[in-house]
Amino acid sequence: MTEETREAIKRLHKGQLIECLADIYRSEIRDALIRFALDCAKYNDTGRMRIALAEVNRLDERHGYDADD
């Protein structure tokens, strides 16, 4: 996990929005956020899971991420 990814997860824990470049988001941060959301679901932390997935959605829209790309 890169420093940018660690920082993104820390910001999510603090309830802050994640700010990152599109290429970093697409290459590593998006996957880490989804894994984090899955871990939260595994431990019944649905609040954090929803926050993580909402942040993925927000960043997908911001950076023009399309799963078909």
Image (cartoon, helix red, strand yellow):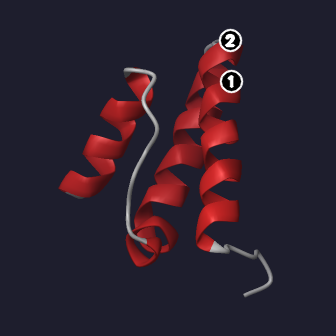
Residue found 53% across the figure and 57% down from its top? 31
Where 29 sits versus 16, above or below? below
Marks 1 and 2 in Cβ contact (< 8 Å): yes
Residue found 59% across the figure and 23% down from its top? 40
Q: Is residue 64 visible?
A: yes
The residue under label 1 is which amino acid type? Ala
The residue under label 2 is which amino acid type? Asn
State the residue in front, 43 or 16.
16
Determine which residue is flagged by label 2.
Answer: 44
Where 27 sits versus 12, above or below? below
Residue found 68% across the figure and 11% down from its top? 44
- The residue most toward the bottom is 69
Q: Is residue 45 left or right of residue 18?
A: right
Q: CA distance from mark 1 to mark 2?
A: 5 Å
**Which numbered dot is residue 41?**
1
State the residue in front, 69 or 60.
60
